[in-house]
Amino acid sequence: MRLLLIDAGNTRIKWRLHDNQDHISLPASAHGAVALEQLDELPPRWATLTMDAALIACVADEGVFARVQTALRQSAQAVPLRRLVPSRQAHGLVNAYVDPAQLGADRWAAAIGAAALHPARVLVVASFGTATTIDLITPRTLQSGSVAERADFAGGVILPGIELMRTSLAHGTARLPLARGSFQDVADNTDDAIVSGILHAQAGAIERLSRRARQEASRFTPGLPALCLVGGGAASQILPLLQVTDLGVTLVASDDLVLRGLACLSEELSS
């Protein structure tokens, strides 16, 4: 069964055709990404694919979701489109959110993908996009004292992304510019000071959650450090600044966790 997995964010849409039976025959067009301003490109690109259904994690507005539905129809793909709604548990991951459905579908899918990729580990999952999200996943301990493959999505934090921080300072103040500076530990001009402050804030948030992850790792997985998985379109700006290894946490660049999580869920749907 071939499923089109779709990650619809606030800036762009990414997709990947998933087939756990025959990966080799999938065409190069089986994966890709377009900005939201380029949604008209989807029908001809998807028309080259053969699929049985589609699964989407959508945090964009309802207009974008409707346009994805239209793109599927226009591509001559009369297939059902299923929308991911975060649940209390899925694929061995238990959702600790008070209201599971309130959790962003992208965060839930990324957490599932991360836990599947690194089972029985304490994980920090950070995505740097339009918004920055940083989440904590912990394994479960069995009565025997061993660590179970099931894990808990403990929750996390959300903050404005790098670009949102930059534009909000320019729009919300009388004298601060739309900064085009570069990172400095201590900046000696306003443009650099703004960019540096933003990046310090982003890096500081992930380092604080990594300290919590280190504590959880000492409890759940002694001898195995927590992992900090970092992805998203703005991750390249943050990765060189992070000092989580100084905290005893292993840093891992991890892109496409949302699509990986959707693939895990699609295997359950097709079984």
Image (tube, grey):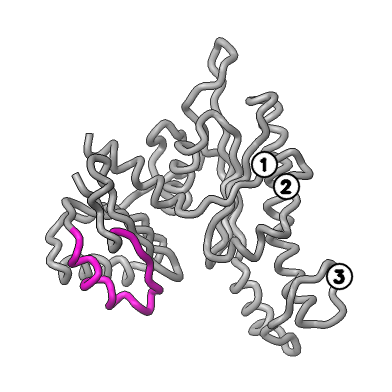
Q: Which residue is mark 1?
A: 250
Residue at the disc numbered 3:
186
71 or 34: nearer the viewer: 34
Quadrant for the C terminus in the image: top left
Q: Earlier in the sequence, mark 1 or mark 3?
A: 3
Range drawn in magenta: 30-49
Q: Quadrant of residue 245?
A: top right
Residue hosting label 2: 244
Q: Quadrant of the N terminus?
A: top left
**Which residue corresponds to the image point at 44% horizontal and 41% vertical from the top-left?**
112
Q: Is residue 195 visible?
A: yes
Rounded to the nearest angstrom, the CA distance separating label 1 from label 3 is: 26 Å
The secondary element bearing badge 1 is classed as: strand
Vertical arrangement, residue 164 with respect to residue 51, above or below? below
Give the mark nearer the N terminus: 3 vs 2.
3
Q: Mark 1 Cα within 10 Å, few/some/many (few <14, many 20+)?
A: some
Please say if the residues under marks 3 and 2 sit with CB atoms less than 8 Å apart: no
Left or right: where 35 falls relative to 76: right
Q: Position of residue 167 (x, y in %)?
A: 62, 79
Residue 95 in sight:
no
